[in-house]
Amino acid sequence: MSFDIIGPEAEKLLDWHALCAALVAGHALPKAEIKDSFLYRDRDTILSRAAWIDGMGALVKTATVFPDNPAKGRPMIDGAVSLLNDQTGGLDAVINFHLVTKWKTIGDSMLAASLLAPKAARDILIVGAGTQGRNLIAAHRAMRPDARFTLWNRTHSAAQELADEIDGVTAVENLESAVGAAEIISSATMTTEPLILGEWLQPGQHLDLIGAYRPDMREVDDLALQRARIFVDSFDTTVDHIGELKIPLASGAITRQDVLADYYDLAQFTRRPEDITLFKNGGGAHLDLMISTYILNAWRRK
């Protein structure tokens, strides 16, 4: 039995537009079955995410989170991705964990922006100057080549350092004014207290929320959610699991009916010019499966 081993060098074969098309095609297939499991040893965690899409295949993505690794010169998060054949269950590919995670996480938001953001939007605010902020700039620029970027980070020096590295990016210190001037706002922070306030928002804007992934995390306040038309990538991975929605749903600030659609109902991803749209990127192993299949197909076509 043979299988492909795909490393980070495959990135040069990938394209954000094609990846969005792969996500659309994946959601036209029967709904995925997904399952997560956790193992713990003191501060260390092993998270295994599995997904199966009839007609596409199956995937097991194992992530390790070892908080002491950075002190040893190793990444805190690592792992492996195994892609399994839909017909035989055999191993089709082992794909670089970081490659899949990057293109899944950012591609998830690129698809939403392509559907919900104004087509002519060019002024983009990135909130957060970490790895995801860097990746967001590259992806948005590929999707909107004439985009203009502002960058805000809680520690301004980190935003300035990243802006100095990338042409066409301006680091700013005032988040309120930056939000008010943007057409697309992509936020990738690990805050538990909302950074973006609903009173700052303007008609016609699109908010893309990536950072929150735990039940205690959220990047926007209740008013932002109340003013926006809310969409998610998956009801199953967001509504009951991530604080961005779980907290305001529990308090009654929003209702379940306010969360309008996920990617299994793409026809609902529409906007009027005056709408404020909000997309919560929650991820899920089914998205890893769709992206891994796209990567394998691109690799084999090379």
Image (spheres, rainbow, N blue to C red):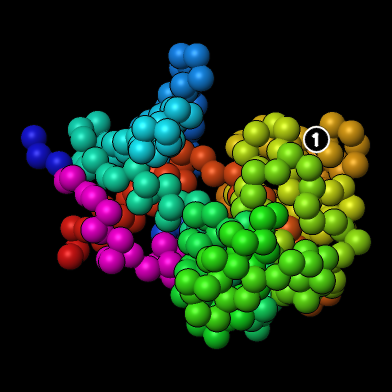
Examine the rendered structure and indicate whether residue 183 appears above or below residue 81: below
Examine the rendered structure and indicate whether residue 65 appears above or below residue 128: above
- For this rendering, which residue is in front, 124 or 176? 176
- For this rendering, which residue is in front, 147 or 60? 147
Disc 1 crowd, CA 10 A, few/some/many (<14, 14-19, 20+): many
Amino acid type at circle 1 is Ile
Q: Was residue 104 drawn as part of the magenta stretch in this picture?
A: no
Give the position of the N terminus as an image quadrant: top left
Left of 50 or right of it: where is 147? right
Secondary structure beneath dot 1 equals: helix
Examine the rendered structure and indicate whether residue 204 appears above or below residue 82: below
For the point 62% across and 39% down, which residue is it? 213
Residue identified by numbered label 1: 247
* Horizontal and vertical percent position of residue 206: 72, 66
The region drawn magenta spans 4-20
* Horizontal and vertical percent position of residue 15: 37, 68
Examine the rendered structure and indicate whether residue 187 appears above or below residue 190: below
Q: Quadrant of residue 16?
A: bottom left
Give the position of the C terminus as an image quadrant: bottom left
* Horizontal and vertical percent position of residue 233: 60, 49
For the point 91% across and 61% down, which residue is it? 199
Left of 190 or right of it: where is 252? right
Count of marks placed on residues: 1
* Horizontal and vertical percent position of residue 229: 79, 58
Q: Main secondary structure of the magenta part?
A: helix
Q: Is residue 27 visible?
A: no
Q: Is residue 273 visible?
A: yes
For the point 74% across and 39% down, which residue is it? 192
For the point 51% across and 40% down, which residue is it? 284
| View extreme (top): residue | 41
Q: Quadrant of residue 88?
A: top left
